[in-house]
Image: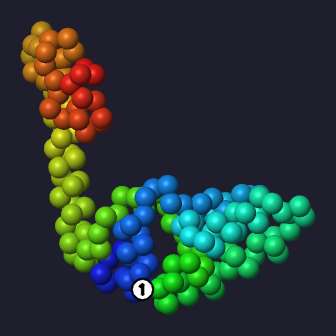
Amino acid sequence: MCTIEAPIHHNVKQEIVNAQETDTELVLRRWKNTSRLYANKIAKQAVKVEKESTSGKFEEVAPFVSGKRGREVFINGDVDHGVWTAGQVIGLIHDIPSCEDLVKRIEREAEETLKKASSLIISSDAPSGSEPTTGSVGKNTNSPGAEIWGIGKSKL
């Protein structure tokens, strides 16, 4: 959705870039049909109606969660016109790249992650009795890749 080529209005793409992972709402829980939506005005109104409803009838919230209004958001660019699905990953989107640039970035980041993760593996064919060069605890050594797992030197 958030690429140059995606056929949706630029305002929606920019709203995604500006969003944080907490900018979503869980809607329709009452009816065991939970959807995570972008927390715009309409989604928040739907949650309010859902929580405050005394009858529990879906008809009360239906106008807010209409798929027709949601589709129109992507065309007219009014991000508050209707509801639209958004996961918490929305907080990890920081730009609007081309599809080509996005695929290259994913490949590069995957390679970097694999290289860092592989540095944590101690070969099973290492000579017996040999000391590992990284990952030792209490010997003032540290795994150079430990930071990718959120473990800083002070924690080892």
Q: Secondary structure at mark 1?
A: loop
Q: How many marks?
A: 1
**Residue that badge 1 annotates:** 9
The relative height of residue 143 versus residue 96 in the rendered view (above or below) is above
Q: Quadrant of the N terminus?
A: bottom left
Q: Is residue 65 visible?
A: yes
The relative height of residue 27 versus residue 63 in the rendered view (above or below) is above
- At a point 54% along the width and 61% down the height, the residue shown is 24
Residue 67 found in image quarter: bottom right
The relative height of residue 70 versus residue 124 in the rendered view (above or below) is below
In the visual, does 66 lie left or right of 99? right
Looking at the rendered structure, the kind of residue marked 1 is His
- At a point 42% along the width and 72% down the height, the residue shown is 15
Density class for disc 1 (Cα within 10 Å; few <14, some 14-19, many ≥20) is some
- Residue 70 location (% of width, % of height): 59, 81
Q: Quadrant of the C terminus?
A: top left
Q: Is residue 128 visible?
A: no
In this view, the residue in front, 18 or 7, is 18
- At a point 36% along the width and 68% down the height, the residue shown is 17
Residue 115 found in image quarter: top left
- Residue 139 location (% of width, % of height): 14, 12
- Residue 146 location (% of width, % of height): 22, 32
- At a point 72% along the width and 57% down the height, the residue shown is 29
In the visual, does 46 lie left or right of 106? right
